Amino acid sequence: MIVVMKQSHTDEDIEKVKEKAIQQGHEPLVINGVERSVVAVSGKVNDDHRAVMKLLPNVSRVIPVGKPYKLASKNYKKKNSIIQIQNLTIGGDEIAIIAGPDSAETQEQTIETAMAAKDAGSNGLRGGAFKPRTSPYSFQGLGEDGLKMLKEASEITSLPLFSEIMDAQHLSMMEKYVDVLQIGARNMQNFKLLEAVGESELPVLLKRGMSATLDELLLASEYILSRGNENVMLCERGIRTYETATRNTFDINAIPFLKQNSHLPVIADPSHATGDNTLVEPVALAAIAAGADGLLIEIHPRPEEALCDGPQALLPSELETLISKASIVAKAVGRSL
Amino acid sequence: MIVVMKQSHTDEDIEKVKEKAIQQGHEPLVINGVERSVVAVSGKVNDDHRAVMKLLPNVSRVIPVGKPYKLASKNYKKKNSIIQIQNLTIGGDEIAIIAGPDSAETQEQTIETAMAAKDAGSNGLRGGAFKPRTSPYSFQGLGEDGLKMLKEASEITSLPLFSEIMDAQHLSMMEKYVDVLQIGARNMQNFKLLEAVGESELPVLLKRGMSATLDELLLASEYILSRGNENVMLCERGIRTYETATRNTFDINAIPFLKQNSHLPVIADPSHATGDNTLVEPVALAAIAAGADGLLIEIHPRPEEALCDGPQALLPSELETLISKASIVAKAVGRSL
Amino acid sequence: MIVVMKQSHTDEDIEKVKEKAIQQGHEPLVINGVERSVVAVSGKVNDDHRAVMKLLPNVSRVIPVGKPYKLASKNYKKKNSIIQIQNLTIGGDEIAIIAGPDSAETQEQTIETAMAAKDAGSNGLRGGAFKPRTSPYSFQGLGEDGLKMLKEASEITSLPLFSEIMDAQHLSMMEKYVDVLQIGARNMQNFKLLEAVGESELPVLLKRGMSATLDELLLASEYILSRGNENVMLCERGIRTYETATRNTFDINAIPFLKQNSHLPVIADPSHATGDNTLVEPVALAAIAAGADGLLIEIHPRPEEALCDGPQALLPSELETLISKASIVAKAVGRSL
Amino acid sequence: MIVVMKQSHTDEDIEKVKEKAIQQGHEPLVINGVERSVVAVSGKVNDDHRAVMKLLPNVSRVIPVGKPYKLASKNYKKKNSIIQIQNLTIGGDEIAIIAGPDSAETQEQTIETAMAAKDAGSNGLRGGAFKPRTSPYSFQGLGEDGLKMLKEASEITSLPLFSEIMDAQHLSMMEKYVDVLQIGARNMQNFKLLEAVGESELPVLLKRGMSATLDELLLASEYILSRGNENVMLCERGIRTYETATRNTFDINAIPFLKQNSHLPVIADPSHATGDNTLVEPVALAAIAAGADGLLIEIHPRPEEALCDGPQALLPSELETLISKASIVAKAVGRSL
């Protein structure tokens, strides 16, 4: 860390910073600049060390030098992580297409949608049984009944199932049905839930929180990785900004940034990032052009009958078109689909 | 809801909107404007009804008319809710000052800080035992041991204890120690946790999420209220914006807005909203001037020894000064302290 | 507009809304819903009409129905606008690549960079002579001398020149040198400047303000269009959000949204949107995949010698690679390059 | 500046950083930390120096150490600046109340409103003749005719006049009528306009841009100060965030932050910061409690007849109430009114 002193500091103030650094087990070095004096402190510095330093007399601010995440970083592991889920490989050359309904609603709709996803060319199945909804008066998902429907649809189509877990207490029950545990945006900093899935054998798809920085997303993944679960996928699903023309703002910069700074696979969710089915295809193609390892896409055979999030669902035929364009874009960036 | 048609719509498109409205149990009325046709749909309309409507052919957008929250609204209950916690009354004329350490660290520090809070004029005690931390490598709180320390400090000072609950499974354990269950910003949309505290007999202090809108905060309170727990306090603790000069941006507008639209008490947390002890006093006074019912303030007898969040802690003597100024501001707005 | 009444309204309040609507030359229609009464007001309603309505007794809020922009909208002109600048066609099938230095620094660097842009496959030249800089102590551009250098570089390469105008008083001088007048993000709502370029014969490239909504961008274009200049290009260059990992957040959703709602061409500026040369290529490809009509890209033969914005400049060889990948992506979305 | 190297750097990379620093006239010092090496570079470092450093091989990032503004800083001038405008003193013990109409509409309304402002206890008059409007179809102000009305109202009431300048070419004309030149939020980074008012003898009220950081606001003031005009007032008028419940988010933290870091007076504009007359009083009182030197408040004798921004205007009687409460709050923080 770099401890920047106020211009009004005394020699004694500098001494206090040095002492505290040594007490923390670090090595201080004083630099007297033209405008400012700073103390460079080397060692394994964490947030709490910096907070303490900030409080010493005439310290102006304290600047972190290293990155706060370790296990998720490219420095820790130079080769990209590849996650194998049955026949689906995520993080390699091939782009994954994980499609399906927003939620399981009926057995029939679930199976019909899963088969349509498969026919259109998907290699993974998404679908929710537990739905985090802003209002307690909205549809909350079918719970375990929904998981049963999704499991059957997954077996019929041989597509591995991605589904959201909302509660650490559901873990062993969820493990009976799903192939990938999804952490939703609202739970990205539900640390008890992150710790729980960190103990699971199943891969985890971790969605970026609505207003999480990329550093915070990587630190959230670190909660899972540090418990021993190495199979974490990051998911960009749009962030909250001042713009209201679309439901969220898809942060396309995030994709190459995450790929450069982490070895974990990066999945894009253009359905939630736009909230509008007419924008899903262009944003999906953009995500692949920017380097995403896969797409999470909502489809529905009859969106106007969906109980939830219909406006962002593609028709199966639209998914098919998207996939055929996506395979050309994938080639342009050295990938296949 | 108001269903706005595209300019290119046909009569048949309008018919479909009308049919769907009737099928949803609502009453449609078509208005042919100069530039646009709209269908006004009356009835008990929810998010899911609107989502479906959005999907019909040539519908441009669907605008909600009513407010999404009910039980939290001033329309539902015109008189301000007053919450009694032992000797502490929140939401009436008197302003509550809930002060204490960020976290319980040692028995000694906890009791010393609680006594200092009391001496300075506080009427509630805050303190964390479970700490949601962005990094898994930061101090995570002492858990149940911390609660025991806080409970003892609360008993010695006769100040009711406010402490954060991070996990629904901790509920019955927490109930043994604390007087008010606090939901942290990161868990504002942890709906399973909201449902759990909705079943508790204890009052709940619900912090606004880092990027939650005021409607979302009120809807989160609705999860608790609708389970039967009427003793909910809302807490403004700063929101995330593009500004980096301060840790968060305290949304002062939120205080009068919430007081006008809801009957629930509103508490301000200037410590987290600024992240800087030199800004705590002015922002605390501002919150009272704007109509807040109470303050949540971090103090520490020796902030530079705090294990966490030291930079935002006031000294006990600074809290005393703050309280004496606050009592004059309170009078200016017809309150006491 | 839809005027939503408070639940406490009286019949008299409704009468006042109706009277005011009629007085404004509009047609009111009262709808008594289950929870709320609303008055739907048809006619050519503007912001000021709505503001007045908001003030009548027991009006809760006023919701706009139509879109605020006219001349820029797809409804006004269904066919995409195509802008011809010498040999460069923008808005048709072909993707435009407008590359060049951030700023003219020396005659030699300017010509060398322009030739490199041309060799790499660009069909337009960008370069600044007037630089809006956050600090008065940063390099401010060479002014008219810079324009002379850029003009010569443009003539040597036969690439039309895009350059920023910062002051309405510079208009006739700028017109001697440049082929396209660029309005920078900081001046998107400098309405006097918009009006001035609205009177020019030259095409205008209008950059989105740092925190402008898409509606505001389109309304800014409306200032130019309504003065008679039909040759306006919109430019997405990243918006300001809470995320600090990159200089700005490129709003990829904006590209298809603008293409769907407006007939004006949309150019992407991945250099400013990322502020980091390692992110320029992936974001540039993403923009084309999402439907952009062109790219604005900073290059520099020796970025470490640039007087300004070097970190986001590509090397000419990197631009060449980008263009070859971009041409495959363009094909995937039915365009050429 | 602190130059942070990538973990993969070589000794040669460090040499290049040192050479470049020396070439820039600065002094480099290498620090080999446990996880990272950094080069601390002392001297008068600006943005452009940092940008160049960022481009050297294996440089990870470059961190500024000093503050980018000089003349506006408390370090440059420790005593608060006090600005005298006729009988009105801004920045001293007394709080200034600058009230008036959003815009001059008619001679009668302007004089009536100014007299009401005076009667309610204001000591400055605000009013616009040039209105920056998002839409070209909204009321744009009366121009010089409006200034004449405002000037007359100012003379009748002996209240000094604050009015917005939108164009550098209007400067000498404006100087005939107004006592303080206001720069609006949309023009905070219209650098040509800042330079122009920097040459004027009149004091300047500089509004914070809609999404400007506090550093950027201070740098904008630096454009004016560095041209020789020392009479600059800063104005917090709300920033743009994701929250839509209010028109803007009033950044209350900004007030104490600016007072701590700059000697310039700070004025609050609760009218634009909330956009809602029911929120103006609480936010105005909050601003004073937080340390503001004055308030800019819109009033209108009949808001529902205002041509622009009526919903945020107070009635004269409401202003009177506000002022009487404000004077008690002022006392609580050691000020008078």
Image (cartoon, coloured by chain):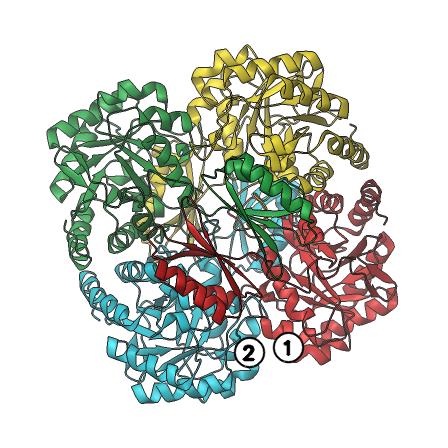
Chain colours: A cyan, B red, C green, D yellow
Q: Residue at coordinates 44% horizontally, 35% vertically from top-left?
A: D135
Chain designation of label 1: B
D267 left or right of B134? right
Compared across the picture, whether A124 is left or right of C11 comes to left
Which mark is on residue A167? Answer: 2
Find residue B50 and report its horizontal and vertical position in percent. 48, 63
- Is D55 in front, or is A88? A88
User: For the residue labelled by badge 2, is the local secondary structure a helix, a strand or a loop?
Assistant: loop
Residue A70 visible from this viewpoint: no
Quarter of image, res D115: top right
Percent of width and height locating residue A225: 45, 74
Mark 1 and mark 2: Cα distance apart in space: 9 Å
Q: Secondary structure at mark 1?
A: helix
Q: Nearer the viewer, residue A308 or C272?
A: A308
Give the camera-side residue of A275 and C58: C58
Mark 2 surroundings: few (<14), some (14-19) or many (≥20) residues within 10 A = many
Please say whether residue B174 is visible from this viewpoint. Answer: yes
Q: Amino acid at mark 1?
A: Ala
From the top left corner, tell me how far across and down residue A29 is, in percent: 52, 48
Q: Quadrant of residue B282?
A: top right
Q: Residue at x 54, y 43 (%)?
A: A38
Tell me which amino acid carries mark 2. Answer: Asp
Q: Are marks 1 and 2 in contact (CB under 8 Å)?
A: yes
Residue B168, which numbered label?
1
Q: In the image, residue A82 lies at what x, y percent?
A: 31, 75
Chain on which label 2 sits? A
